[in-house]
Amino acid sequence: MELTTEDGTSTAGAGVTTGFLARRLGVSPTTLRSWDRRYGLGPAVRVDGRHRRWSPDDVAMLQEMCRLTAAGLPPAEAARAAKETARGRVAASPALETRTRTTARARTGARAPQRAKAAGPGPEPKTAAGRTGADLAQECRGLARAAVRLDAPAVQELLTTAVRTHGLTRAWEEVMVPALRAVGRRWEASGDRHVEVERLMSWHVSATLLRVYVSAAGHEPPVSSSPVLLACVPGELHTLSLEALNAALAERRVPVLMLGAAVPPEALTAAVRRVGPPAVVLWSQSWSTANLPLARHLAATRWGVRGARTRSRVLLGGPGWGDEPGPGLLRPGHLAEALRLITAPDDRTAATTAQARS
């Protein structure tokens, strides 16, 4: 495997420096030195016996280390597997091979209990899928690290595993959203130097949500009713949360009409009158795009045959709206609550559910 430095120079002969390799893998130079000291994942050759120069084989070994730790394997165990893989074997033993495959791909079994701290709290409660909060946090960190390394296959594998293991709603709220926020904070803190990381993560999250939607919508036609309308307000381009809601509704056999980003007011009004949706979800990511007059207008828009006209529930999603949108508008705080409000049997039930939050 041949690497090139930022100026395009080949490193096949001399190897790469620790700093260059750290940037390539998305880890700190301190982490590489620690892995060398603790687990023997150092370069095979050192210039003058002191300076580390990493060969292509060394780089491949560390990439495997990053992949395994991102999948949740403990560092010591991941290091053993990475070194054995570098020597041409799949794993050090059948037990390690089984553990690596289970953790990196299926990840459906519960981990062994952690040691209890002296005079500390008891074991952390398990989730419905048998995972602890610490496990989910590890998945988030692994997903973010894979994105920082620009390791697209690992990002996609981790996202697919999260949905398969936890279900879409929990995977979105407890894995995808925290990882997206972590990547976003890194981007904001460093200017535009990590925009490629954010774009990679967003693209693969979107692809995962679309795959769930297509799979759910392709089995049998949804129940016969008007579709729920999902749209971003004018000027709003962030669609990931609506894509998650779109996929989750499809799983529940609820018909959906997804209009996507930055829908003009006249188009929203026309769509509401044409399809008569039981609910309209408007997404605003920031206060600069939130449009309460438009939301109130849609909530007051009547549709249906003359003499039996009715109105749609209007749900305001996203941080741009604030906490108190006003009467006649519903304000879900997360995906699971939006699903409850949309599938509530009537407006009074939905309003009662929304008021219970405050």
Image (cartoon, rainbow, N blue to C red):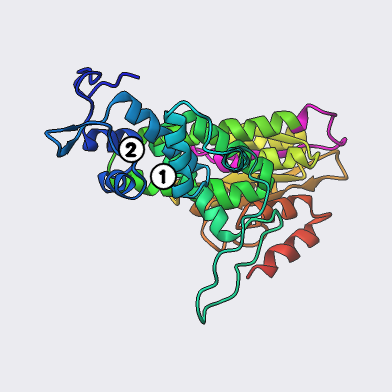
Assign the N terminus to one quadrant of the image. top left
Asked if residue 300 lies left or right of residue 11, the reply is right
Camera-nearest residue between 58 and 308: 58
Category of crowding for the residue at label 1, using alpha-carbon neighbours closer than 10 angstroms: few (below 14), some (14–19), many (at least 20) = many
Looking at this rendering, what residue extends furthest in the front direction?
93
Give the residue drawn at x 53%, y 48%: 139
Question: Whole-percent x and y of residue 67?
Answer: 47, 37
Q: Quadrant of residue 53?
A: top left
Question: Are dots 1 and 2 in contact, CB under 8 Å?
Answer: yes
Question: Whole-percent x and y of residue 12?
Answer: 25, 18
Is 238 colored magenta in this rendering?
yes
Residue behind mark 1: 183
Residue behind mark 2: 194
Identify the disc placed on residue 244. Answer: none
Question: Whole-percent x and y of residue 129?
Answer: 70, 53
The numbered mark, 1 or 2, whose residue comes first in the sequence reads 1
Q: Quadrant of residue 82?
A: top left
Asked if residue 22 lies left or right of residue 127, the reply is left
Camera-nearest residue between 334 and 6: 6
SS class of the residue under badge 1?
helix
SS class of the residue under badge 2?
loop
Is 349 colored magenta in this rendering?
no
Q: Is residue 58 visible?
A: yes
Q: Mark 1 belongs to which amino acid?
A: Val
Secondary structure, magenta segment, majority class: loop
Magenta residues span: 216-242
Question: Whole-percent x and y of residue 232?
Answer: 56, 39
Q: Quadrant of residue 243?
A: top right
Give the residue drawn at x 35%, y 35%: 25
